[in-house]
Image (cartoon, coloured by chain):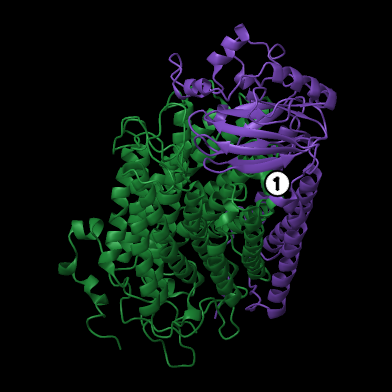
């Protein structure tokens, strides 16, 4: 039996232990509240990032007109718009949403812990996002505007950009690029704090009986992601700091010298290496791509069995394939650099490792199909999103093989084909899983159900318009439309592609407005949705079977539950029902740690 | 005890609503695709494929090898795509919830796992091996073409223009007849062109869509690339129509027919290089051997002597009118032409 110190679950019942508003909603150390904080912050920035993308799309479709609510866009502002779109979406939306929101909310509930191992560090990890947010948001208002070197921030373009000490232009500290570097550096700390917490929590705080191979796949994916992030994020932090020093202190890590940009002189003596930035940056940012997809895979692997009423197909291959994605993820970074001027012999090496990282993804896809095979599938909103994830991830995965082939990459590199590929993975894949995850865990978070009709309408419109937006980008890329150009007006060879640009923009605008349905549903249901049962989906994992909806302080009303079996025992022949909770004891001894549970008909 | 093998009741429209939704989805996608396919026909570059824009015609010696790989991967991934999506759809329709039904209790199948690990591994490994030759032929410096037929050109990329330098009619570098072209590349057909490229400021990327060539041009590095054109610009113009300006770009009252342009090979910067990245482009002219010789003679005669130090001195100072450094130094060029 757990000690009295650990076992403080009952405290939530007493009114005098209710924390004040400040400690409940602002500096909360409760993992569930921190998860919700991450989620709502990310949703807000999802709107901002989306608006930036729409401005980009508007300019591409109708370059001679003003962007509504924004005005005229010149080349510089265009670069700022897409740079900030990507930065906001990656660093403020996808990573905080997956690791921050789902990581915090789901991990302790699914492994049977009362909270994270380091609750205070956890709160710090959320609040560290704010300095970073302030940096990125302020950068819109400093002279020269926000960062404009792309989210990859390639040197030396980013080093000689506005405000740098390496040029004869007036140096300033408060400029877009510096603020971008500092902002991303701080969000890196947030992510390291979070990851550290997840790893320790998962290793040390699992409930009795919760062996590693009884953990739900969401927890596995977040565990692997956290390890990945712990190894790669410090590299990014160091790299960003090097660029900041190049810009502010006059070091020349990435500046080869003898540069003659068109509108100013370069002061530095040089001696740096341009390709070094790309190697270091992609050493983090390639694993970061897996940071952005692995938890989504985990969430989908949790949703599919629940709504197919079937055990996940190949649990261990699922775990091993995630682990191998994480391992291989560290040796494929240079596939972003096939045309960068690195030794062509390296191209072969990284091409082979890239081909083989497609393998675990293929294994996962086949296993998801296997999970659906012979199931008894109901189509609630979370399931619709999870199924869209699988079907869209197939496209995003397969299109990657084109670029992995180095000669084909020679043509497709830096075209819209790449833009289509990343958006199929991150929007049509990860964002679908995020919507699936939010609609799935919403009852546990807020104790209320989301509106099913509105949810399905949102899914339907999103599914149609995201394909309308991103699929044609493949075709644009094949037609030779290179990326990051403000319009094809000057390129006669791309003029015939313009009508597809217009079509994509129309779909993108519709896609953007469809997301409002989700926000309405989210906030309306949070306050006025019908009350949720403890386990509305009849799922097996501890978060549903043992914790009330919404879960109180300390998660478990009684003692910490004990785990007796793997997480996906649906339609087991041992019981009449088609679900068999992880914590349930069969064989007449009654139940341990779930005395008040609804699961009592066995 | 009642059977609780289902999650809730069928949706508002009953079980078939799922099928209906999928059908509606396919219909909408079909409408979208056919609507785009029936768009106004513009002269084609890129080429058309089922009404969609497609790969521009490949006109270098290695373009076919690259395109074959592209199509190989396209058919392969297309096949995998159709099979997996069809299975997904089949399972969704076939195994949708039924009253009293219970799922198959299965945790996986070891042989299946092995099969769908080893077969894709074999396929991916095969692709990896198949492409190696093409990649090496194009990018490995030791495999570059050599001999008398090779034309050597130097590239100096800068924000936001391409500058190309030729050894001139005498074939020697550093002589007064060296030619420097701004945003214009002229090459003979059926001769290997070896280019040594560097950048004067930031990273640019040298992209010839028709040649299927792309290579970043990096400051502080000398990177060599090669290509051999198989069709002259004139030959291409015979099979490609004029470019017609799309209506989004027309100014008020502008006639699309009047603003149409002749077909041309493009030289594109494919890597973000600053404010006017989208405007950094040049043209490539592929001439027949005779035309090229004539052009080279004439251009060498008109060339500016870049070895004169005062020209470089001039280049280092800014143009008072534009605030930019002119490269090549236009003022000197004009003076020489004036004489």
In the visual, does A579 lie left or right of A71? right
Chain B, colour shown = purple
Q: Pointer 1 indicates a residue of which chain?
A: B
Quadrant for the N terminus of chain A, please: bottom left
In the rendered view, tell whether residue A229 sits above or below residue A319: above
Secondary structure beneath dot 1 equals helix
Q: Residues within 10 Å of mark 1 (few under 14, many from 20)?
A: few
Chain A, colour shown = green
The x and y percentages for residue A262 are 47, 27
**Point 26% across, 80% down: residue:** A7
Do we see residue A80 in this rendering?
A: yes
Which residue is nearer to you in this view: A299 or B63?
B63
Q: Residue furthest top?
A: B339
In the visual, does B164 lie left or right of B232? left
**Point 78% across, 42% down: residue:** B63
Q: Which residue is mark 1?
A: B26
Q: Residue furthest left?
A: A16
Quarter of the figure with residue A268: top left
The x and y percentages for residue A374 are 68, 71
Which residue is nearer to you in this view: A294 or A139?
A139
Do we see residue A483 in this rendering?
A: no
In the rendered view, tell whether residue A227 sits above or below residue B258: below
The x and y percentages for residue A282 are 50, 54
Which residue is nearer to you in this view: B284 or B246?
B284
In the rendered view, tell whether residue B97 sits above or below residue A492: below
In the rendered view, tell whether residue B187 sits above or below residue A337: above
Q: How many marks?
A: 1
Quarter of the figure with residue B198: top right
């Amino acid at each position: 039996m757990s000690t009295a110190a650990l076992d403080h679950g009952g405290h939530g019942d007493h009114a005098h232990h209710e924390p004040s508003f400040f400690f409940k909603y602002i500096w909360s150390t409760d993992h569930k509240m921190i998860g919700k904080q991450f989620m709502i912050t990310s949703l807000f920035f999802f709107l901002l990032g989306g608006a930036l993308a729409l401005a980009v799309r508007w300019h591409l479709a109708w370059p001679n007109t003003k962007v509504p609510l924004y005005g005229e866009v010149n080349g510089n502002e265009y670069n700022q718009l897409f740079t900030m779109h990507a930065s906001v979406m990656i660093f403020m939306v996808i990573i905080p949403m997956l690791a921050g929101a789902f990581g915090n909310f789901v991990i302790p509930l699914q492994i049977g812990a009362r909270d994270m191992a380091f609750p205070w560090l956890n709160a710090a990890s959320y609040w560290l996002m704010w300095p970073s947010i302030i940096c990125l948001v302020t950068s819109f208002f400093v002279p020269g505007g926000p960062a404009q070197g792309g989210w990859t921030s390639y040197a030396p373009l980013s080093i000689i950009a506005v405000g740098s000490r390496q040029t004869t232009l007036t140096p300033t500290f408060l400029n877009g690029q510096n603020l971008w570097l500092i902002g991303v550096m701080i969000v890196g700390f947030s992510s390291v704090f979070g990851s550290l917490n997840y790893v320790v929590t998962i290793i040390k705080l699992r409930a009795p009986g919760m062996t590693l191979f009884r953990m739900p796949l969401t927890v596995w994916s977040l565990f692997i992601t956290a390890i990945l992030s712990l190894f790669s994020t410090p590299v990014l932090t160091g790299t960003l700091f090097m660029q900041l020093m190049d810009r502010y202190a006059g070091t020349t890590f990435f500046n080869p010298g003898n540069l003659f940009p068109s509108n100013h002189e370069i002061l530095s003596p040089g001696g740096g290496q341009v390709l070094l930035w790309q190697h270091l940056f992609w050493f983090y940012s390639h694993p970061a791509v897996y940071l952005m997809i692995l938890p989504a895979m985990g969430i989908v692997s949790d949703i599919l069995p629940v709504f197919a009423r079937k055990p996940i197909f190949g649990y261990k291959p699922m775990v091993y394939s995630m682990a191998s994605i994480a391992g291989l993820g560290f040796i494929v970074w240079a596939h972003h650099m096939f045309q960068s001027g690195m030794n062509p012999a390296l191209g072969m090496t990284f091409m082979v490792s890239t081909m083989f990282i497609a393998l675990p993804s293929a294994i996962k896809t086949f296993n998801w199909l296997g999970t659906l095979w012979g199931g008894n599938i109901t189509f609630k909103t979370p399931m619709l999103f999870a199924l869209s994830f699988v079907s869209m991830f197939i496209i995003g995965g397969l299109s990657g093989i084109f670029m992995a082939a180095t000669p084909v990459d020679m043509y497709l590199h830096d075209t819209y084909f790449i833009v289509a590929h990343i958006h199929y993975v991150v929007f049509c894949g990860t964002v679908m899983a995020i919507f699936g995850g939010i609609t799935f865990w919403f009852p546990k978070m807020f104790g209320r159900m989301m509106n099913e009709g509105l949810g399905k309408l949102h899914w339907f419109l999103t599914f149609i318009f995201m394909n309308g937006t991103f699929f044609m980008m493949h075709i644009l890329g094949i037609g030779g439309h290179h990326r990051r150009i403000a319009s094809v007006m000057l390129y006669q060879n791309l003029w015939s592609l313009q009508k597809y640009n217009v079509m994509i923009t129309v779909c993108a605008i519709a896609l953007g407005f469809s997301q409002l349905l989700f926000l309405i549903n989210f906030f309306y249901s949070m306050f006025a949705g019908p009350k949720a049962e403890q386990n509305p989906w009849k799922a097996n994992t501890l978060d549903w079977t043992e914790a009330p909806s919404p879960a109180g302080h300390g998660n478990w009303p009684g003692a910490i539950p004990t785990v007796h079996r793997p997480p996906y025992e649906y339609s087991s022949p041992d019981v009449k029902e088609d679900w068999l909770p992880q914590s349930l004891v069969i064989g007449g001894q009654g139940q341990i740690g779930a005395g008040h549970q609804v699961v009592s008909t066995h | 005890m009642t059977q609780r093998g289902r999650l809730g009741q069928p949706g508002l429209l009953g079980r078939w609503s799922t099928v209906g939704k999928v059908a509606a989805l396919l219909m909408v996608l079909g409408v979208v695709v056919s609507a785009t396919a029936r768009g106004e026909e513009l002269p084609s570059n890129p080429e058309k494929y089922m009404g969609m824009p497609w790969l521009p015609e490949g006109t270098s010696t290695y373009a076919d090898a690259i395109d074959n790989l592209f199509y190989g991967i396209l058919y392969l991934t297309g096949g995998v795509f159709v099979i997996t999506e069809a299975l997904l759809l089949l399972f969704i329709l076939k195994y949708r919830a039924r009253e009293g039904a219970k799922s198959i209790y299965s945790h996986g199948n070891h042989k299946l796992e092995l099969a769908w690990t080893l077969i894709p591994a074999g396929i991916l490994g095969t692709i990896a091996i198949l492409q190696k030759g093409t990649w090496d032929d194009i990018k490995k410096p030791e495999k570059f073409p050599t001999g008398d037929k090779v034309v050597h050109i130097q590239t100096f990329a800068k924000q936001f223009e391409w500058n190309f330098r030729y050894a001139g009619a005498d074939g020697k570098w550093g002589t007064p007849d060296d030619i420097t072209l701004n945003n214009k590349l002229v090459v003979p057909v059926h001769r290997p062109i070896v280019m040594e490229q560097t950048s004067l400021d930031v990273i640019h990327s040298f992209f010839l869509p028709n040649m299927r060539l792309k290579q970043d041009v990096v400051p502080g590095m000398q990177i060599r690339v090669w290509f051999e054109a198989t069709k002259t610009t004139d030959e291409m113009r015979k099979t490609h129509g004029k470019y017609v300006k799309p209506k989004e770009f027309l100014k008020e009252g502008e006639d699309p027919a009047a603003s149409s342009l002749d077909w041309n090979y493009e030289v594109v910067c494919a890597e973000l290089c600053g404010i006017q990245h989208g405007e950094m482009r040049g043209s490539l002219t592929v001439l027949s051997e005779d035309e090229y010789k004539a052009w080279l003679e004439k251009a060498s005669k008109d060339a500016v002597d870049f070895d004169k130090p005062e020209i470089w001195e001039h280049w280092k100072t800014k143009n008072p009118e534009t605030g930019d450094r002119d490269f090549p130094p236009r003022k000197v060029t004009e003076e020489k032409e004036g004489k």
